[in-house]
Amino acid sequence: MGRYTPIIFYLLMAAALLVARPAFAHAVLLESVPGDNAVLAAAPAEVLLRFDEPVTPGRVEVLNSSGESVTADERPVSKDNEVHLALPKGLSQGTYLLTYRVTSLDSHPVGGTIVFSIGRPSQGGIAALEEKVAERGSIWGLLATAARLLLFISLVGAAGGTLFHTLVAHDLWRLDDATRHRLVALALLGFVAAILGIGIEGAALKGTRLANIEGLLSASLWRMGERTSLGFSLTVAALALLLLLLALERTRGRLSLLALPASLAALASLALTGHAVTAGPLWLTVPVLAIHVLVAAFWLGSLWPLWQAVGERPPESALALLRLFSAIALPAVLLLVAAGATLACLQLGRLGELFTTAYGLRLASKLAFVLVLLLFAALNRFWLTPALAARRGQAAHRLRISIGLEIVLAIAILAATSSLGEVPPPRALILEAEAQAANAQAANGTAMGGMNMGEAAMPSSPGFSVVIFAEGGRGAEIELSPARTGTNTITIHLFDAAGRPLAAQQVTIELSQPAAGVESMEHKLTAEYPGLYRWANAPMPLAGNWKIQLLVLISDFEEIRFETLVPLR
Amino acid sequence: MLKRFLLILFAGLLWAAMASAADPAIKIDKAWARATMQPGATGVVYLTLSNSGPAADRLVGVSSPVAAEAGLHIMVMEGTVMQMRPVDALDVKPGDSIQFKPGGLHIMLTNLKQALKQGQHFPLTLDFEKAGRIEVEVTVLPLGASAYP
């Protein structure tokens, strides 16, 4: 059997590559009709959402200002990159909230709201309504993370454990009942978590409320979850774990031959979906992710059997097992770290994002756990295992505690990994900001000819602009576009007390967000025209108030400083 | 210890509240608008804004019952072209005295409900982040006026 293992591995990898559906980047809403904040003269017959890639529509509904759905009887229809939803006739005047949730092929649900009014806007109420809608989504995000964690634990424990017993211990066919039952229980846990995950994905997409038991049990919800790329991956995982469970139940029968391929298939299922797959070219991401998952599961899955062996077996037997493991583990861990680093680089775009975005911070905490785990691994290999070989007293006891701590760290790493799925990676944020900026520009271009009622006498500002003054009546107009998280264009007009453009020798801009601990980024600007400065791609990945400081060098003897706060959504 | 801290905090808050009530930090004067020919046209308001308080504030909105919409704008040079740009906020730092004047900062009144006639007065509300809403009376000056007399 052992001889064929590599062949089976490569076959499965090839199969994973073949089934991987064409994946695209994070879906981005490019346009909506009606547009955000539009005031329409008459009720439209339908609403339209256009994305940059084909999407699976989940919940798309229109709420009136008291929060009731006016499209309960309508179903969203998707055609290519567009999602259409018919509106009922006779909608009354007032403000409406169009909320949508769709999934792109990277399995990440993308949601948002568009506010539009018919006739005239209603007074108030919309802000609270938007909050309520956002809340509904976050519960499912939390449950999805929990389900993912359970699935990861199961994959590491059952599939990773099977790898260990096959490749290192060579005892899968003569496992004691307790171990076999533990593996079976872990596989069962993963099977249940994967099935629940499909339902949670469907519920998140449809925006079903947690209390709506009937809605949660409806077949359409589960079909919805299954149709997404995450659902597909979870289905593969569930089937593979079921197979593994049956194989482990009958380790002496012919079915047992399936334990290893089932484990590999269950692990490979993770490479079929997720942010990591869509981060770069498929030929790179799918194999790299598969290697990462496989080696990680093998390494972490070995911890429990090793812990058991050190505690229960005589020292010679435990030592032999540790040495066998060690011989594979060292190159495996190097491979694992290399694969993980490749994926992280693809996701982040640049190192700075590790500390400035929610995704980066979660990834950083995962890396911190991994570092500690590597320290423990080194401790075990270079100190505790030799101590056991030298038959020093307490050596087995210490080694056991150390491996036990490694298991705790492994669970922490899995928890950090499962929480990564709920936040968009920085590369997606940047894409989104760019699309919205382009969209805002296009909208400004067409606003004049459109049916917006508030006649656009003035080009409306596409972001946020503020005027500040410094000594001597000199001022600056600072404009931020689109004033949303991601990349912004900062335009600065400097003028003197008489309103004439202010020519400066040098202008330096400093960006920071003290409240979130984002230290200042410095950037030197060159004048496009006298008094006009622009920074076309200022990285501003967090929402909240950003501090902008301008250091303007007028002459060798005079420098003026402007300082202001700009809010980012 | 905690009690004393709370007492000091309370006294401080009380003092701050009294100080702000006694002497408004934000002052607006010399508010004027140019007369217009007919309703529906666009009006423009200039004024002087000063902050004598210890804290910075921010003007975030303007409104007036005489116009459907009011907004803050600034004229800036972009190359050789004078451009009017809408402004969302104006920072008013302690000690600042900011003049709204032709060719610079101004308040646009769009879709006037009535023509602005010379000698007339109308209310204008300025919305500040900290000082809240402040209402001022705007004097309408003749068509060719370019500064408050």
Image (tube, coloured by chain):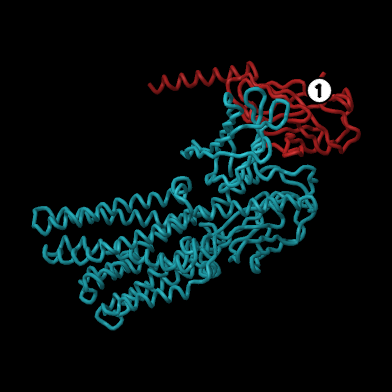
Chain colours: A cyan, B red
Compared with residue A206, is residue A510 higher up or lower down, i.e. above or below?
A: above
Q: Is residue A357 left or right of residue A175?
A: right
Q: Would residue B89 be seen by someone viewing this image from the given angle?
A: no
Q: Where is residue A124 in the image (x, y as percent from the top left)?
A: 67, 42
Residue placed at 81% from the left, 35% from the top? Answer: B67
- In this orientation, which residue lies closer to the viewer: A127 or A335? A335
Please state the horizontal and vertical placement of residue A15, each as a whole percent of the image. 43, 76
Which residue sits furthest front?
A556
Residue at mark 1: B147
Instruction: Give the left or right position of residue A413, taking residue B23 as reference.
Output: left
Give coordinates of residue B38: x percent, y percent.
Answer: 91, 35
Residue at 42 percent across and 76 percent down: it is A14
Q: Please indicate whether residue A316 sits to the left or right of residue A77 in the image.
A: left
User: What chain does badge 1 belong to?
Assistant: B
Q: Is residue A521 visible?
A: yes
* A98, above or below A221, in the image: above
Quarter of image, res A110:
bottom right
User: Element type at marker 1?
Assistant: loop
Number of numbered markers: 1
On screen, A181 above or below A381? Answer: below
In the depicted view, which residue is nearer to us: B14 or A568?
Answer: A568
